[in-house]
């Protein structure tokens, strides 16, 4: 079992909210890069990633995240950003860091 990034954000509270919701939905998830945020308060200088433990659940996780973000208009998400295209041909919303079709991570992300 390998893990996968589901969502990337500068908002730590939002990352926790999403990770918690995913855990509630039975998809094990966690927030990465938190240690970088110490001392910077709620909005940090470094983005954090919401990751899931099981890459197999990626498409289910992305659906949950997308729904949650739609219900959070104040979440600061740039839903207008242009989607990216995966190598497999799938068009992916800009807020996602991995392809829900084949599981590949978006190229060019740290
Ligand atoms: Zn793909």
Image (tube, rainbow, N blue to C red):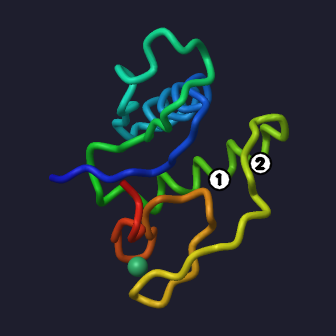
Picture layout, residue 48 above or below residue 37: below
Mark 1 residue crowding within 10 angstroms, few (<14) / some (14–19) / many (20+): some
User: In terms of secondary structure, where does tag 2 sit?
Assistant: helix
Picture layout, residue 6 above or below residue 93: above
Picture layout, residue 93 above or below residue 91: above
Quadrant of the rendered structure where residue 43 is? top right
Residue found at the very far left of the displayed protein:
1
Mark 1 lies on residue: 66
Is 60 or 78 nearer to us in this picture? 78
Is 4 or 77 nearer to us in this picture? 77
Task: Name which residue lies at 45% across and 20% down.
Answer: 37
105 on left or right of 20: left
3 on left or right of 102: left
68 on left or right of 57: right
Mark 2 lies on residue: 70
User: In terms of secondary structure, where does tag 1 sit?
Assistant: helix
* Residue 38 pos. (x, y %): 43, 13
Which quadrant is the C terminus positioned in?
bottom left
* Residue 15 pos. (x, y %): 54, 32
Residue found at the very far right of the displayed protein:
73
User: In the rendered structure, are the residues bearing label 2 and label 1 in contact, judged by CB atoms less than 8 Å apart?
Assistant: yes
Task: Name which residue lies at 38% across and 24% down.
Answer: 36
Is 98 or 67 nearer to us in this picture? 98
Task: Name which residue lies at 65% across and 53% down.
Answer: 66
Q: CA distance from mark 2 to mark 1?
A: 6 Å
Please count the marks in the image.
Answer: 2
* Residue 90 pos. (x, y %): 51, 84
């Amino acid at each position: 079992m390998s893990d996968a990034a589901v969502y990337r954000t500068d908002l730590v509270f939002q990352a926790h909210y999403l990770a918690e919701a995913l855990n509630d939905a039975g998809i094990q998830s966690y927030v990465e890069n938190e240690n970088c945020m110490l001392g910077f308060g709620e909005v940090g200088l470094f983005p954090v990633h919401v990751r899931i433990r099981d890459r197999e659940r990626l498409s289910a996780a992305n659906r949950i995240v997308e729904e949650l973000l739609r219900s959070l208009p104040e979440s600061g998400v740039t839903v207008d950003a242009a989607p990216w295209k995966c190598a497999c041909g799938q068009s992916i919303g800009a807020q996602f860091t991995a392809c829900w079709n084949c599981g590949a991570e978006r190229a060019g992300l740290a």
